[in-house]
Every structure is written in C-alpha cells, then in structure tokens.
Image (tube, coloured by chain):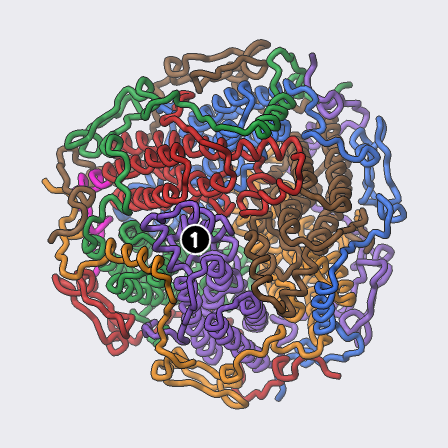
Chain colours: A orange, B purple, C brown, D blue, E red, F green
Amino acid sequence: MFIHNKKLQYTVRVARPDPVLASFMLEQFGGPQGELAAAMRYFTQALGEVDPGRKDMLMDIATEELSHLEIIGSIVAMLNKGAKGRMAEGAEEQADLYRSLSQGCSVQTEALLYGGGPSLTNSAGVPWSAAYIDSIGDPTADLRSNIAAESRAKIVYERLINVTADADVKDALGFLMTREIAHQKSFENALNAIHDNFPPGKLQGKPEFANLYVHASHGNGETLGPWNSGGDWRRLDDVESALPLGGGNGEAEVQLTSEEDKFISAFIRRTRSDPETQPATNAEFGGGRH
Amino acid sequence: MFIHNKKLQYTVRVARPDPVLASFMLEQFGGPQGELAAAMRYFTQALGEVDPGRKDMLMDIATEELSHLEIIGSIVAMLNKGAKGRMAEGAEEQADLYRSLSQGCSVQTEALLYGGGPSLTNSAGVPWSAAYIDSIGDPTADLRSNIAAESRAKIVYERLINVTADADVKDALGFLMTREIAHQKSFENALNAIHDNFPPGKLQGKPEFANLYVHASHGNGETLGPWNSGGDWRRLDDVESALPLGGGNGEAEVQLTSEEDKFISAFIRRTRSDPETQPATNAEFGGGRH
Amino acid sequence: MFIHNKKLQYTVRVARPDPVLASFMLEQFGGPQGELAAAMRYFTQALGEVDPGRKDMLMDIATEELSHLEIIGSIVAMLNKGAKGRMAEGAEEQADLYRSLSQGCSVQTEALLYGGGPSLTNSAGVPWSAAYIDSIGDPTADLRSNIAAESRAKIVYERLINVTADADVKDALGFLMTREIAHQKSFENALNAIHDNFPPGKLQGKPEFANLYVHASHGNGETLGPWNSGGDWRRLDDVESALPLGGGNGEAEVQLTSEEDKFISAFIRRTRSDPETQPATNAEFGGGRH
Amino acid sequence: MFIHNKKLQYTVRVARPDPVLASFMLEQFGGPQGELAAAMRYFTQALGEVDPGRKDMLMDIATEELSHLEIIGSIVAMLNKGAKGRMAEGAEEQADLYRSLSQGCSVQTEALLYGGGPSLTNSAGVPWSAAYIDSIGDPTADLRSNIAAESRAKIVYERLINVTADADVKDALGFLMTREIAHQKSFENALNAIHDNFPPGKLQGKPEFANLYVHASHGNGETLGPWNSGGDWRRLDDVESALPLGGGNGEAEVQLTSEEDKFISAFIRRTRSDPETQPATNAEFGGGRH
Amino acid sequence: MFIHNKKLQYTVRVARPDPVLASFMLEQFGGPQGELAAAMRYFTQALGEVDPGRKDMLMDIATEELSHLEIIGSIVAMLNKGAKGRMAEGAEEQADLYRSLSQGCSVQTEALLYGGGPSLTNSAGVPWSAAYIDSIGDPTADLRSNIAAESRAKIVYERLINVTADADVKDALGFLMTREIAHQKSFENALNAIHDNFPPGKLQGKPEFANLYVHASHGNGETLGPWNSGGDWRRLDDVESALPLGGGNGEAEVQLTSEEDKFISAFIRRTRSDPETQPATNAEFGGGRH
Amino acid sequence: MFIHNKKLQYTVRVARPDPVLASFMLEQFGGPQGELAAAMRYFTQALGEVDPGRKDMLMDIATEELSHLEIIGSIVAMLNKGAKGRMAEGAEEQADLYRSLSQGCSVQTEALLYGGGPSLTNSAGVPWSAAYIDSIGDPTADLRSNIAAESRAKIVYERLINVTADADVKDALGFLMTREIAHQKSFENALNAIHDNFPPGKLQGKPEFANLYVHASHGNGETLGPWNSGGDWRRLDDVESALPLGGGNGEAEVQLTSEEDKFISAFIRRTRSDPETQPATNAEFGGGRH
C-alpha cells in the first residue's frame, strides 16, 4: 500500500509565476519521458515481476518516481498560480489576459481546459498515453528499456535546466536530473546481475544471420566502425545480388483450398485493371462538362 | 532516395490461410515493437544525426527494417488471402463466415475495415502511433533506446514463434528475430564508440544524489544486490525522517505580485470548504424528495 | 513524498490462473473508470488545489486509489501467472497455446506484447489516456466530476463481480467497490461544504434562458417530468417558430477588411459551384472509356 | 430522424476576424468539454436508454447540443474567414502571413491543415476523441456524469467570456453558457426522480468499509471536515498498522497446476538476479574500451 | 438549428439479441468509415463553406448522416438489449455470462464499460477519433475526400450485409448502403460543377515533373498501363542514375551563423563516434562479470 | 526489398535555420496529409493487392513517397540545426533561447522532446497515427481514397509555399507539390481502368433509394444544382411527412426471450424515472445545509 507524507522529497521555491515556463515543465509531468511514465513503467513491471530482487528494486524506484511527479507538478502549480486566479475571477484587463494566453498553445489550453492546475499532457498539450510505456515482461528487455528511459529523462531535464532562468527552479530540476542518473545505474547493475542476458529471451536464432551487417544504404558518407565491420561481422555490400537471403524465389505464397481460390479468383476478375483502357479522367477534363 | 526490388529479403511460404494467426502477426507490423516503429525510429534519427558514422549506420538499418516490414506484411497478406476473397465476393455460408470472424477482435476488424490487407495496427486492432517512437536527438540516449527496442522486438518474435505451428512461417520469423540480435550488437558497439557516454548529456548533476539509493518501499521481500547496495551506493532506509532531501521545509511556494495575490485570494474565499457545514447529500437522502 | 508498504491494502487470493478473466479485470487497471484514472484525477487536483481542506482530502484519496491500482494489478498478475511461464519458456503443445490465445483480443495482446504482466490498457487493449481525466481546476465542477467518476467505477466493479466465479476474487472486488461508495460520500460532502456552489463559477448568465426547456425532439414517447416541466421551467415546444432565440436573423456574420474581402471573394469566384453544369461523372460512366 | 433549420438557435455577430481567438473557441467545438462531446454523450445514452422519460429528455438535450455545436462552429468560421482567403489565394505579404501564423500552434494547424474551417480539435490542436465520453449505461451513474459535464462546460464558457473582448461574441458565449446551467438542472432533477439512487447499481458492498475514511496522507495541512469526520465516518489514522484491511497476509497468491509451476519456475531460474554479481556496467566504464 | 423527429428514417426490426453481431455493427457507428465520421465530415465542411450551393448540399447530407447514425445505433441497442439486462441485474448463471463475454473483445468492453449501449468505438473497441476526418477547406480536395469516403462506407456496409443472417437487419443495412451510393453521386456532380478543378488549388507546379512516372520498384511483376505509360507520361526507369532530379548534389545543406556553428560543432565533437574503438559490449560479454 | 541511395531525390538548400518554419513543415512529415501517411497508404495497399498492375504501381509510388519523406525531413533537420546545437550545449543567453522556444508549441516540443530532429508529429505536435490511413482493401474505394489524398497533399504543399519566404525551400516544396499532381493522375487512370467501378463493390443496393435526394436542411440559402436535382434525381422535400422511408412504424424493436425480458424489465423497474417526484437538488439549494 502507498502512504503519503505531505513533505515533498525536495523543497520547491519559484521566484514568480510564469505560465509559459510552466508549459515547458509539463514535458516531465505528462510527457513521454516524464515522471508518470517512469512511475508507471516500474510499477507495472514490479507487479508482474517474479524475481524478488528486481521486484523490490522496481517498487522502490516506482515509489520515488511518484514522488518526483509530485515535485514537478508542484513546480507547474506554482508557475501557474497567478494565471489561475486571474482566469477564475475575471481579469480586469482582458486584452492583457488574452495576450498572455496567445503566446503558446499549451498555455491557453492549460488555462481554458485545466484552470491552471498541472495537466497530464506534454508541453504541446498532447494527453499522456500508456503507449509511452514499453514494458514487455521479459527482464532483460525491460531493464534495457528502463536504462534507456532514464537516459532520455536525464536529457530532457538537462534541456529544461538550459531554458530556465529561475535559480531555485533550476536547483530542483538539478535534483530530479541527478536521480535519473542514479536510477540508470541501478538498472544497469540489475541487468548485469542476470547471467546470460544476451541475446534476450531463450531462442538463439539462425547463426548465419546473427553477425551479418546489411549495407542497404549506399553513396557518399559511408563509414566503417565497430558497428558494421571488424570483429566477427560479415558485411553484405551488394544487397540486391544476394536477394533473397535464405534461398527460394523471394516471393510470398500461400496454399489455398479450392473454395478459397474460387472466391479470390472471382474478386481478381471483377476488379482487374485493364491495361488497354484509355480512360478519360477528372484530371484530364479538369472538371465539368459544359 | 529509396529504391525497391520486388524480391523479398527472405522468401515467405505459408501453408494455409489463417486469419487468427494473421492477427497475431500484426503485432510486428503495426504494433509498438514492430517493424514500422523500428524503421521510423532509425530513419528519423538518421535525418537529424550530425555524426557521419552513426548517420550511415542508422540509414542502413532503417532501410533493412522497411524490408522487414514488407516481409511481415506479406505473411499477413498470405494468411488473410482466403478471408479476403470470401468477404469481398459474399460467402456462400454466412454462418460460417460469421463464426470465423467472431473469434477475435482484430480478425473482425481486419475483415470489415481493412478487407484482408495488412493494417497498421497491433494485434488488438489499436492503430500504430508515433508515440511509440522515443527518439530525443541525443545519441547516447537514442542508442540506448535502440538497444532496448531491438531486445523487445527479439522477444516478441520469440513469442510469435512459440504460438506458430506452420514450419515455414516459423522459419521466416526466425530470420527476422535473428536480425534484431545483429542490430542490437551494432547499436551497442556504436554506443560504446562514444567516449564519455555516461551520464548522457553534458551536465553532471548534484554529486550528493548520484549514488544514493532511496529505499521507498519497505516490508517483506526486501533484497540486497548490486543495484541498491555495495560499491559506491549510499542507501537511505528511513526515508520519511530524511525529508526533504535538499533542506528547506519540503513545501512548494511562489512569490506573487499583489495583483496576482488579490485574484487568487478572491478565488480561495469564493470557493473555500466550510468545515462546519453539515451537508445533506444525494448520498444520504438516496435520491428524490417524495 | 510517497512511501510504499509491501503489504497490499487487501489480501488477494486467486483460485487459478485465467487469462480471459485477467483481461476483464484490466478494465479497472488501465480502463477509463479504473484506478489509475481515479488516482491521477485526484492527485492532479490536489497539486493545483488552493483550499487546505480539499487538498488534504484529495491527497488522502489519491493515495488510496494508487493502493487500489496495486490490488487490481496484483489480481491481473496472478490470473496471468500461468500464461506468463508458458509464453516465456515455449509451450510444449503449441496448438493449445495458440487456442487459448485466440479466445480474446486482449488475451493475445497481453501475452505477445506485455508478457503476462498487467498492462495499462482497458479490457479491449486500448492504452490508457489522460483524455479520461476531466479535471478543470474549479472545485465545484471537479467535485461533481469526482462524484460521477466514483459512481461509474462502482458500477464497473459490480459488473466484474457479476462475471467472476472465483469467490476470493469476488471478495477483493467487493472491497474495492465499497471504497468507491465511501469516496463518493466524501466528495458529496465536500461539494456541499462550498457555499453557493450553483451555478458553478462566478458568472450567472442570461436569466431568460436559465429555466427554459427546449423541446427539440418531438413525436411518440414525449414524457413530462420534473426535468422538463413544473417548478420554474418554461417549456419551449414549437422550437422552429421561435428561432432564433435571442433576436436577430439567425445567421452568422463577420466584418471583413477590404483586403480580407478581396482574398475571400477571389477564392469564392475561383471555386464556385456552377449550377448550370451537367457534369459527366465516374458514377455515371461507371469507370473507363473503352 | 434529424431535420435542420438553416437559422441558428442564436444569432452570431463577429466584429472582425481573429484566428487566435478562433483557436481558443475550438475548446468548445472539438475539446473535451465542448459541444460535440455533450451531443454525443446524450445521444448515445438516449439510444441505449430503456426508460421513456429519460430517453425523451436525453434526445431533447442532445439535439440542442448539436445546435450549439453549430453556433460555436459558426463563430470559429467567422473568426477564421479572413485567414481562409489569404491562405487559399496566396497572401501578397508572406512575411505577414507567416508572422500571424506563428503566434499559436492551433492557429498554424488550422490554417495549414484545415484551411480556416472549424476543426474537431481542442485549442491545442488535439483531435476530438470518444475517450472524452464516459457513459456506462447505468442511469444513476450517467446522470451524475452529465451533471458534472454540464458544470465543466459552464466553467469553460465562463473562461472564454473572460478572454474575449468582442461584445457580440461574448453575448453568444453567454447564451451558450446559460444553457449549460439549464441542462444541469434537468439532469439533477432526473437523477433525483430515480428512487434509491445511492449507491449506484444494485449491490450494497461490504458495510464495514462504506463509512471508513482512510487517512493515507499525513503531515502539515491535515484538516477535518464533513468529508472525513463526524457523522457516521470511521476514520483510520494509522494506516500502516492496520494493514491489510480485510485480514490475511496482505500478499497476492494464486494456485498453479504443476505444469504451470514447471514453466514459471524455469523462467524464474533462467532470469534470476544474482545478488553476488559485481557487474561492470556502461554506467561505470563511461563508454568505450580503448 | 437541428430538430429531431422520434421516428427513425428507416424502421429497425431485429430478430433476436446478439452482442457479437452488435460489435460488428459498431464499425459503422464509431468506426472510421461510420456514420459519425460522415456526419462530422460534412457538417464541419458546411460550417466553413463559402459557396451557397455546396453549403446547402453539405448540410442536407450531414443531417441525413446523423439520422443514419441513429439507425445503426438503434440496431446496436436492440442487439445488446438482452446483455444489458443480464449485466445490470446479475445473471443467474455466471458461467454462461462469462462465456458469452469471452467471445470477442468489443463484446466484453461493450458490456463492462458501456453497459450495453452503443459506444462510439469501432468493432475492435478503439474510440472514435477526429483524426478520421480529412477535410482541409479546399472544395476540390474535400469533395474528392467525400467521394472516397462514401465509396468506403458503401463497401463496409456490403461486408456487414455479408456476415448478417437476420433478414430484417440485412434490409436496414441495405437501405444505409444504398444511401451512400446516392451521396457519392451528389459529391461527384458537385466536384464537376467546379470549373478547372484539376489540379486542385491555384498553383500549377513545375511542369517538367507533372507527367513523369518514377519507376522506383523494379523486378518481376512490372506491368504497363495507362497509369504509368502512354498518353503524355514520361517514364523514368533508371531512377538512381537520374539522381537528383532537379540538379545540385542531392544533399541537404543550411547556412549557419558562426554562433550556431560553434554550438553544433561542440556537440558533434562531444558525441562523435570513434571508429577506432573496440568496445566491449553487453552483447559480447553476455551479462555480468562473475 | 528496399535499397537506399544517399542522394536525395531533390537537392535541399536552406538559407538559414528557422525552427518556427520547421514546425510548419512537420505538417507534411508527420501530419495527416504528409509523406509518411502517403507512403504507408500505398505500401499497405500494395502488400494486400492481388492485381499485378495495381500492385506494381502502388509499390512504385510508395517507394517514391518514402523518398519524399526523406526530403521534407531533411528540410526540417536543416531548419532546426541551429536550435539543436544551442539546446544540447547550453545556450549562453538563456533568455534568448527561452524566448525563441516560447513562440510556438511544436517549436518547444521539438526542442525539448525531440532535440531538433524531425519528429513524426503534425505542426501542432500531435503524433502521427495510423488512423490517418483509410485503406479498406477494395480497389475502387482505395483508388478514390488515393486520389483524394493526393489532392489534399497538393493543397497543403501549396499553403506551405505561401508561408515560406526562403526561395530554395519554396523550390523544393514546389517539386514535392508537383509530384502529388502526377500521382493523382496515375490513380485516376488506374481507377478508370477497372470496368464497372461504380457503385464500388458487388451489391447494387435498393434501387428506389439510389437516386433520391433527401432535403433535410431547410431555410434561406437553398440552392438547386446537378448534385440535388435534374437528371435522374428524385428530390424529397417534405422529409418529416415521408417518415419512415421504407414503411413500418419508424421504431426500433427486438424479440427477447422470456429470460432476457425478465432481466431488462427488472432493470427498468429498478431505475425508472418517477415523474411525480419533486426533487430537491443541489442546483436548487445551492450547496450546503447550514
């Protein structure tokens, strides 16, 4: 069960309201790399996890991410506190309110739709979606996803720090950014505590294709590096001549029953394209017979 | 520019149509771990990439993923070929058609909406969304995201192999699965070819929080491991006593102008909750005065 | 800050795995009336709330809803535990695995995509969206939204109880259902603790239209009741004769500058529909000139 | 069947085109609290309703909401009429057109994508989604949802009035706002015309949990009021000591067959986290072996 | 303003409830080719239309489509009427209710979430989205979109007729299907009543590329027809040799200021991929140092 | 299989970075009428196509559209190249970076979330969705959809040209626009090469409703034209008197079993609306009993 302590994990001081900056901050509240995505990613993994060690770690970090969601949401609420009052009580100078709202789209949506509270949208006003969560229930894949997610969140915090002038907001963002670094380390260690974590899963696949690099894009700018040559890489340069890779004719086929064949053949006949046709088209007659 | 060779990268043989199996395969056509997601992930990264080596690699792999999208889509088309004809030409035995469609939701949606062609949905019929793509334009984060994405795709192919009885379809799925392993290696090598790739980005953050493990979930099942103890970890066990971490009072505050304060105070007064009220509620009177 | 106690708020016993029943339960995990929607609804309101009493109540209930999300997610995890193992390790009898997966769409998506863990989707596999949350930052509106949300969640739990045979699962669902009733009462009392809570907001509107009932649908089945007649209702029966309600000509007009008029007039001329045309159409010639 | 009278229900006068103001107005055209959401909410309820009185009322109000959709859409069309011509015919002064479009995101999307017509998006350009509609087919829940929806719509109209300087547009918004008040009254009366409307549905739940207030958030700011104390409330303050509420061990368990156990145990062994591992990680070696 | 007559435009008789068939019918209620999409497509075009003839036609057809939405929704309500009662009152035989719900995903979602009323989803349970509407405010494009939309809707009705055994439901579907044919003819005639409707819009483009067919896919199966040869087509067979089409070097370039160049160069240096690196990767060491 | 040539199909020159213009261009990268939508529309149709001629054409054009996606994405990358460096390296003058980001919502989202690379969103930041693709697997419907899609894309390019001052960007947009014209011609010719392409599909429908024009919207502005009168049109002016069109009573009915009737009757009784009730409502007592 969750318990809540009304103290924030980190104190939030905001110098003055700024709804445009608030809309930037939403990126980490309801955006794809934000704290709700992080919390739900680890929380759902924890519920499905069958290894005691990872389950414990995932619930620790999920709980902390919920607390970070509270911090970033509190920053948004403080930045919007001025707009909230003006919008609710009717501003004396409407032109001014109109002007401040017309500066950015999430600003206006925040004010009109959400009344100045933090909304679960990204900085463009797009609602948070569970499509952001990529957990699939295999620990070696999920831990790699978590490592990647933490690195993305770290970068977004860095960018938010870069656009923020308020020193206290910067300070809180710096705390949140640093915690992503710590979480990334936990997940890297947990991944490497699984023996035989590569390839993920149980099947080994076809060995003849596991070290093949398919050079499908040719022209100026080709570069060699450890990702496509050297080591145990086999490099396939003349891609078209080698088609298809596994033998056969490179076509797709299926065996139909005679009844299935009857129906699809009727469909093909009924809708066939007649190459002998010389059609008059709208494109040609430019619209309208007069 | 892209060029297309009508040969598939790998030959597709399907023993007989099976629209239910087709709907499973959609997971890798229009699902979050599928080939369109892979292709677009690398293609958009390639366009924004400023390093020649990574740009070359990303375009190579993006191009191959488009070719895999073609393979998995061809499998779907073959598995649906029987249903396509029956649906278009009017099945003789409607009850039978109705029965086969009622087996699963994407089966019926495939037939009604997409007419038996491969649709860009996952196996539940949810349309593909660019929300699946998590590229953010920093190479150390994006490469980690790519490593994770390849490992997830590998697992989904493994599961599809596990549910497929058709040996030829299994064979093609095995090819596609193996290529994900090869791509994962390319991305791992490319990540490690960036010096100083950790922490991602440029800012180092607050050192006092980078090695702290916050033990926020307590109770039976606590476990120690390299992800939360040992090494340079500092472990915070009594989380509540330590609040807030960075000092201060753990509250959120903002400085308002007097005009801002006037509006928000008016709002607070107008909408305050009166604790002395003893309200009659719908809940209490159960609806309706008679 | 949030803290987590590894004990569930309510003990979960599941008689045997049943992935189809698990997919039903997802309705309250990642569905629109589910526990994540409830938790995020109250949590975001709490962050933006400026009244101490409501803020305290909202955070209490938000925290409890997170704990309910944990309970329902644990039920899903238990119901899926059998499928998780079979899918990961490769079932011996593929035909059987295939058959059990083909029974319902979220079953297959759960298995293929989420690997048997609880996913933040509804029972049809649609990802959770913040579009489900309708908070707008006015307490009299938000509390009414919360009352409604609790009543909907109560009904969905009742339906889940109706389809569940497992007595222990029924018991846990009964607990969760009852808590929605308690929360609805809290929100009703909190709404009624706001003096002058109707109409919501500050503006009173146009009094001549506040007690008007517009009888816009006519025919068999018309019924009188306290919602459209009696009391202070004025009933408008002959809707068309009364058009437009506020005077004027019932048309939409705007003043354009001469430059604006020049452009739109050019557009109108360029694209006008010529009623004298006697067009030949595809529809008429049935396709193709031969 | 629906019939349309070309007169608007309320006359629309707009002083001059203003695409930024138009984008605000979209909130009530294609936004979550807007008129399409209202119309579809009541229309779909009316189709499924089995009580004659509510069916009649729901269709009356649904029909009026469609007419309101027409009014707000006509306001948008008038506000965009200038931009529509300039965009279609090619503005003489491109820099000016570019500047006016760059002011807000829905402005540019309206112009580029929708060509100046009203689009079914909210003020941030997010497409309307049926996820906004929360009807569930139980009248006591649906009427509460309708009451809440009307109160939200009223607030959004109030905010739009607050940002609008054009007196005639304000007048039309005032009409629309007032009608939401009247509809809210109809729905409240209809709810209270159902005897025994609380709790919603048929099941009464577990009485020992129906009057319990769980005080899950503790710290500064705790407040007593009729929503959490007094009356018949039992207040649970020491939440953790009372865990789990219904007895048992607070854990989640399921009975597996021996075959299910065999598979999941194999999975656990294969992917276990080894706490003795001292892994080298990317995080530690900072990328690259040189 | 809209008015509603309680008679349906076409009488609906349903032989017996069938929730699986109901879920198929949802394709035309809340699906992409369904009646809400049609009604909203024409209604929003009508509001933005500046030509009197098209505005009149669009509102006529939009109004009729709303009436068709009512017909198809009534069919769904009748097909679900049995399930609605059982779900609300608690079925005596739960196993039976469970079984009927487990047959298809929208069936269960309909019952659990929407309580047997028609929901604005497609047959897979995906909520209706305004992303289905492709109007852009140019009449020659929008009329072509309407022609296409009517032809798609006609096909979906044909497929629904093919899977329906109930003669009366087939009859009503036949009515709805036929009306799409009539609407398609109206839109074709209206398109051809615009002089010079090709190319759409005002700009003529680059004449050297308007009659060029780019043969970008080569291999077995190449076919000649009036769409790629003959008439005024110029056919480009050797695509790669002709790159880039308009001259230049086929690369993308931009002029940066020296400050812009300084920043991006620093970024390139900081994140460059070192081809000399011989990285050790997870992929290679398979996880974990022991 | 796809192959990639690193030369663009058309050379891209950009005079100077401009992230606001970049956000406009996204409309054709990740927007509904953009190049990904075009490529995926034709590619998925090609995979499901059973006619050799159309399959060849669809794959040719799909491949070219991918190459156009590359061109428009390269324009975006060039326009964002300045912002990318500043955001990653930390701008010296934060106020300036903040100011430039606050100009438009996709600008800020591009920078914060996507790091200056092209993102698969429209110009308002809404992620690309496969809901944009309307293919249904019938060639006469799909070709009409393709014709419409090309005409829409042509218009959006024309509008982008109208707002762009950079002559080289205009030039590239002109190329892309012209190719849409060529593709529209191919699809028109291919449609007309199908004999008997109207009505689409196989069923002819009810002849008595195929030439009927339902005049459902009455009032000022009624207009006659070839779309609603003349030729073989029958025009129904007095819509209400003619209800229902096909005979019967215009009501919706279903035959229930006695068990079904028992449940729904119990539900009706339990939730009936009592017209004699004189309810006290929140609306009336305005909140709170004191």
Looking at the image, which is closer to me, B123 or B216?
Answer: B123
Question: In the picture provided, is C130 more to the left or to the right than D256?
Answer: left
Looking at the image, which is closer to me, C133 or B232?
Answer: C133
Q: In the rendered structure, does residue C157 fall within the stretch colored magenta?
A: no
Picture coordinates of residue B49 (x, y %)? Answer: 47, 72
Q: Which chain carries label 1?
A: B
Which residue is labeled 1 in the image? B110
State the residue lying farthest toward the left.
A290
Residue F62 appears in view: yes
Picture coordinates of residue E79 (x, y %)? Answer: 49, 34
Looking at the image, which is closer to me, C115 or C59?
Answer: C115
What segment carries the magenta color? E188-206
Q: In the rendered structure, does residue E205 fall within the stretch colored magenta?
A: yes
Q: In which quarter of the image is residue A168?
A: bottom right
What amino acid is found at the position of numbered circle 1 in the picture? Answer: Glu
Picture coordinates of residue F255 (x, y %)? Answer: 49, 28
Question: In the picture provided, is F90 more to the left or to the right than F199?
Answer: right
Q: Quadrant of residue F172?
A: bottom left
Relative height, residue F184 to residue A96 (above, below): below
Relative height, residue D147 to residue C174 (above, below): above
Q: Quadrant of residue A54?
A: bottom right
Q: In which quarter of the image is the N terminus of chain F?
A: bottom left
Relative height, residue B77 to residue E245 (above, below): above
Picture coordinates of residue A277 (x, y %)? Answer: 14, 57
Residue D159 appears in view: no
- Give the structural element (helix, strand or loop) at label 1: helix
Question: In the picture provided, is A116 more to the left or to the right than B278?
Answer: left
Q: Residue at x 60, y 65 (%)?
A: A152
Q: In which quarter of the image is the C terminus of chain F?
A: top right
Secondary structure that dominates the magenta span = loop
Q: Residue at x 75, y 63 (%)?
A: A55
